[in-house]
Every structure is written in structure tokens, then in C-alpha cells.
Amino acid sequence: MGGDTLSPQPHRHDLVRVDPAAWAVKLRQRPDLDGVPHLAGWAEAGRLLIIRRFFPGEPRDSIPLGLPLPPADGKRRISFAFSPEDLSPHPPLALADTRPAAPGTWHSTLDALIALGAEHGLTPRPFGSLLWQVATGLTYLAAASDLDVLWPLPTQTIPAGLLAALARIAEAAPMRLDGELLLPDGAGLHWREVLEASESGEVLAKHLDRLEMRSVAMLKGRGSP
């Protein structure tokens, strides 16, 4: 596939496009997907897929991908695996770039999150329904949708005050606010779990290829290496 190539160490939540020819071949190999709406023209339309975690026992020589169908089509989550040469990376979408697609009732919350990111030198990113609405042009957002936000961090420690500020924004938000903190080593941590965990406790960290527990004290820069 022409153009940019994937990083040798892709992470969960990275966005990609699939070569349309490879996509057509893959669909022919997946009779379980016959007749599933939107899939036939997915790659040709330039719609994105997201890198997911490997399933247990899944071969590691391919890139694990996923996409959810829109709620009107059942919200089914569909998994694929493609060779790296069939994929091209897509730049992350910033939360600020997706604001125009969000319901008007979300705008004050989005503005608060964007401002919080700027305060800490961070660029929050959407995932979940808001991401898919923008990435596909299909309808994913509904009145009961959550707002899912990724927080890529430049270091292995969480900036002081970030979690408490997130909690305050979440309390005032008209929707449920969820999301993950993304560490430079690829680990993803649910921010609410870190916020609610004991200082001496541990939280689950999700990687592309494994799960592990991380010390809360270390994440907050208060532990010994």
C-alpha cells in the first residue's frame, strides 16, 4: 500500500486505513460478514479502523483491528487482522477537531476538556461514538451516548491535578464521561480507576499484547522505581 507505513510498534487506539483491494479479499474470506451493512464499501470510502488488543492466541504477525457498526445497525463490534503492508496510518483526531460533530449540549463539556488539556500541555482525543461519527460519516451519536476521551501523556506519570479536574468536569457534564490515560509505553489506564484507587493500590493497564497491573503511587510520581 502506498504512502506512509505503520510504526513498528503500533498502539491500541491508533487509527488506520486499509487498502481497498486487501479489504475486498478479506471480506471474501469472511462469509460470516455477508450482508452486514456498510462493510462492502468501507475501505473504498476511506473510513477508518482502530487498532485493538490481540485476542488470546491470535497470531502476532498481523495487526489486530476493529470497528463498531452504528447503533441503528446493532452496534456489533467486528474484528479483523491485516498485514502491516495493507495498512496506512491516519493521524490521531484531536477532540477540538471533532467538536463540530458533537451535540450542542456537549459543547461546554468539550470546551472544558480542551482547556484542561491546554493547561497541562496535552491534546485530548475522542474515541467511542464521537470518534466513529467523524471517522466514518455514519450516525453513531445518540441522546444516551457517552463521551469517551483519550489522554496521551508525555511521561509515565500523571500530571498533578489532572484527575481531580476530570472528575469535576464529569460531575457537571450532561453525559457520562469515560476514557483512558495513554502512557508513552502504550499502556492504557481507565482514569476513573486511577482516581478511585488507593495510593498503595494497583490499577489495570491495557497494552496491545498484554494486561498488567501498575502501581498507583508510581503513576502519580510518588513511588520508588
Image (tube, grey):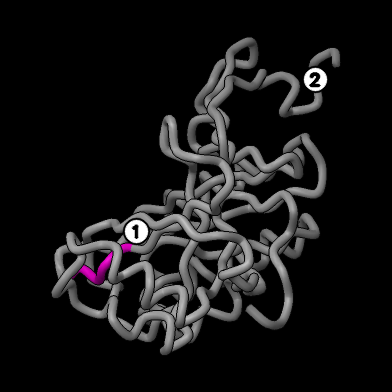
Task: State which region is magenta.
Answer: 68-72
Whether residue 60 is visible to the viewer of this picture, yes or no, is yes
Comparing 120 with 80, the one in front is 80
- Which residue sits at x=67%, y=66%? 115
- Which residue sits at x=64%, y=10%? 200
For residue 192, side relative to residue 165 (left or right): left
Outermost residue on the bottom side: it is: 45
Query: Percent x, y for residue 152?
Result: 68, 53
The quarter of the image holding the C terminus is top right
Lower sequence index among marks 1 and 2: 1
Q: Is residue 123 above or below residue 2?
A: above
Q: Which residue is mark 1?
A: 146
Query: Percent x, y for residue 142?
Result: 24, 71
Does 177 lie within the magenta span? no
Q: Residues within 10 Å of mark 1 (few under 14, many from 20)?
A: some
Q: Residues within 10 Å of mark 2 (few under 14, many from 20)?
A: few
| Callout 1: SS | loop
Comparing 81 with 140, the one in front is 81
Query: Percent x, y for residue 215?
Result: 66, 18
| Callout 2: SS | loop
Comparing 62 with 148, the one in front is 62
- What's the residue type where badge 1 is placed? Asp
Whether residue 72 is visible to the viewer of this picture, yes or no, is no
Q: Which residue is mark 2?
A: 222
- Which residue sits at x=67%, y=42%? 186
- What's the residue type where badge 2 is placed? Arg
For residue 219, side relative to residue 58 (left or right): right
Total marks in image: 2
Query: Percent x, y for residue 121?
Result: 80, 59
Give the quadrant of residue 144. Answer: bottom left
- Which residue sits at x=37%, y=77%? 24
